[in-house]
Amino acid sequence: MKLSIVIPVYNMGNTLERCVESVLGQNYDDYELILVDDGSTDNSGALCDRYATGRPFVNVIHQRNRGLSAARNAGIDAARGEYITFLDSDDLMADYTLAVLMTRLGAHPDYDILEYPVWWHWGDADQRLLTFGVNEYHDMRDYWLEGEAYLPAYAWNKIYRRKLFED
């Protein structure tokens, strides 16, 4: 399996279906979907379980509420893909996103991180495209400082080589 998609979930029953359906509707299928229910008190946990029913590539983790980072870390620990990406449970993935990104990674097997543009506040009056120049960095320090990676320091607009999370 090439990609693990980790979605941390906490009381997002009102947006979770839209989020998960946007992943399931992709035209790319070499992935596993890991839903981490972080102690939700609404219907989110049940929705996660529903999505796993009959879909062996959907894995659900239920844990007591420990916060976003702990939920992502639980997903990382469960991930089996060569790469990992994160999607927040109130976000959605545009059609063809995974196919395009994984094709790019296939053309550049040396990439450890692929950062990609995202729409911020999609559908709102203030929506805008968060985009980046086309750059390659061979040193994390250069990426962080020269590429100003600290400005859009989000976990969810990148695909990471899973090995980066070991040790």
Image (cartoon, rainbow, N blue to C red):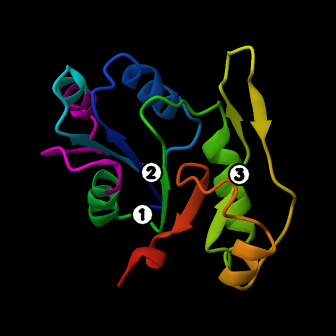
- Residue type at tag 3: Tyr
Provide residue 39's location: percent of width, then percent of height: 16, 38
Provide residue 118's location: percent of width, then percent of height: 69, 40
Residue 55 inside the magenta-drawn segment: yes
Q: Which mark is nearer the camera, 1 or 3?
A: 3
Nearer-the-camera pick, 38 or 85: 38
Going from N to C along the chain, the mark reached first, 1 or 3, is 1
Q: Which mark is residue 31?
A: 2
Contact? badges 1 and 3 (CB < 8 Å): no
Residue 14 inside the magenta-drawn segment: no
Left/right of residue 24 with respect to residue 55 in the rendered view: right
Going from N to C along the chain, the mark reached first, 3 or 2, is 2
Q: Which mark is residue 92?
A: none
- Residue type at tag 1: Gly
Provide residue 148's location: percent of width, then percent of height: 76, 66
Q: Which mark is residue 81?
A: 1
Q: Which mark is nearer the camera, 3 or 2?
A: 3
Query: Residue 115 sits in which quadrant?
Result: bottom right
Contact? badges 1 and 2 (CB < 8 Å): yes
Query: In what quadrant of the picture does the N terminus appear?
Result: bottom left
Disc 3 versus disc 2: distance between alpha carbons? Answer: 18 Å
Disc 1 versus disc 2: distance between alpha carbons? Answer: 7 Å
At x 31%, y 61%, the residue is: 73
Q: Which residue is mark 3?
A: 116
Q: Is residue 60 above or below residue 3?
A: above
